[in-house]
Image (spheres, helix red, strand yellow):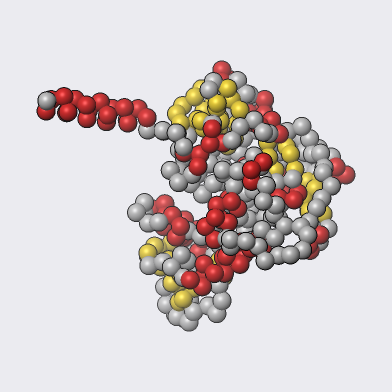
Amino acid sequence: MAKVTIDGHMIEVPDGTTILQAARMLVDKNPEVDAKVAPPTMCYYSKLKTSGGYCRTCVVKVTKGSEKDPRPMPKPVASCRTNVMDGMEVVNITSPEVLEARKGVVEFLLINHPLDCPICDQAGECHLQDLGYEHGLAKTRYDFSRRTFNLIDIGPYIKLHMTRCIMCFRCIKVADQITNNRFQGMLFRGDASEISTYIEKAIDNDFSGNVIDVCPVGALTDRTFRFKSRVWFTKPMDAHRNCTKCSGKVAIWMKGNEVLRVTARKDQWGEAIDWICNDCRFEKKDAKDWVIEKPSHISRHSVISQNHYENLAQLKLDIGKQQKQIAAKK
């Protein structure tokens, strides 16, 4: 076991734990700790092997290497690929140097990313949108033309917008590790790299839709939900059904009694709790197909939380008690 201090908070974690994992464990075990102590990520995904190390948004500064060697590391490091050592001290949101470095990373991510949030289905739940708001610059210093791509049809269910892609490689890892019939991959090299399909074949397998859930931007979106509604006008509800291919535990996004889309349930880090099959995601769009459990948990800081009261029943009870107390005083 190793003791590590992150932004003044100490936690003991197993050997081999990365700084990012330790920070998330710290937040999970201590609700009073600000969730921002855990560095943001765009390419790391705990359920995907070998993910992380590409985007550098999770950079932190190690001010003390370990108890045995207290020297600081000379420059910011990627927390998703750096293991903790006993006695290590790390600064993230408390370091102006780290925040300045992250601002530079965000500027690079936005070099070719179009500002088409008003027409993007990912708006309102886009990790890059959040990152740009919290760490981005007011305007770009990039004067050259942005990259353009020829549109590629990758099937009836998934829409690919390569102009929005930030090369996080999550979708490729899903295709490699989750699906059983991979056609998707990375073409070319360097600044000419792009995600595409082999000889433009459609992604046609039972779990290909999970690339939508892992994409942190609007590069891969649900074609069946395209332009139907903004996410903050919908009501996400936890639901389940008996499914022979997956757990059947999902979040359904409703507008009135209509199911607009189906996604995997996600944890507080925006990661899918269970992979779901394409039948559940694309084919079951009738409320009668599902057993609705309760409103999905949505962070109160999210725009999706607008008019979304997951504790509505308890709220009604509290209001009733207050009304009785007022009436008794009269």
- In this view, which residue lies farthest toward the right? 199
Q: Nearer the viewer, residue 40 or 231?
A: 231
Q: Residue at x 58, y 61 (%)?
A: 138
| In this picture, residue 228 sits left or right of residue 62 | right
Q: Which residue is nearer to you in this view: 255 or 144?
A: 144
Q: Position of residue 178 (x, y in %)?
A: 68, 43
Q: Nearer the viewer, residue 298 or 149?
A: 149
Vertical relation: 171 (above or below) 57: above
Q: Quadrant of the N terminus?
A: bottom left
Quadrant of image for the C terminus: top left
Note whether residue 302 is visible.
yes
Question: Left of 51 or right of it: where is 130?
Answer: left
* Image location of residue 124, percent across then percent down: 56, 43
Q: Is residue 306 above or below residue 29?
A: above
Q: Is residue 176 visible?
A: no
Across and down, in percent, residue 37 comes to: 44, 60
Rendering quarter of residue 118: top right
Residue at left offset 47%, top offset 66%: 92
Q: In the rendered image of this protein, does residue 96 appear above or below residue 229? A: below
Q: Which is nearer the eye, 235 or 45?
A: 235
* Image quadrant in which you'd find residue 321: top left
**Residue reaching furthest top?**
288
Instruction: Identify the residue at horizontal 64%, vertical 30% (top origin).
Output: 228
Name the residue rendered at 42%, 51% in the picture: 28
Count of all numbered marks drawn on residues in the image: 0
Whole-percent x and y of residue 134? Answer: 52, 57
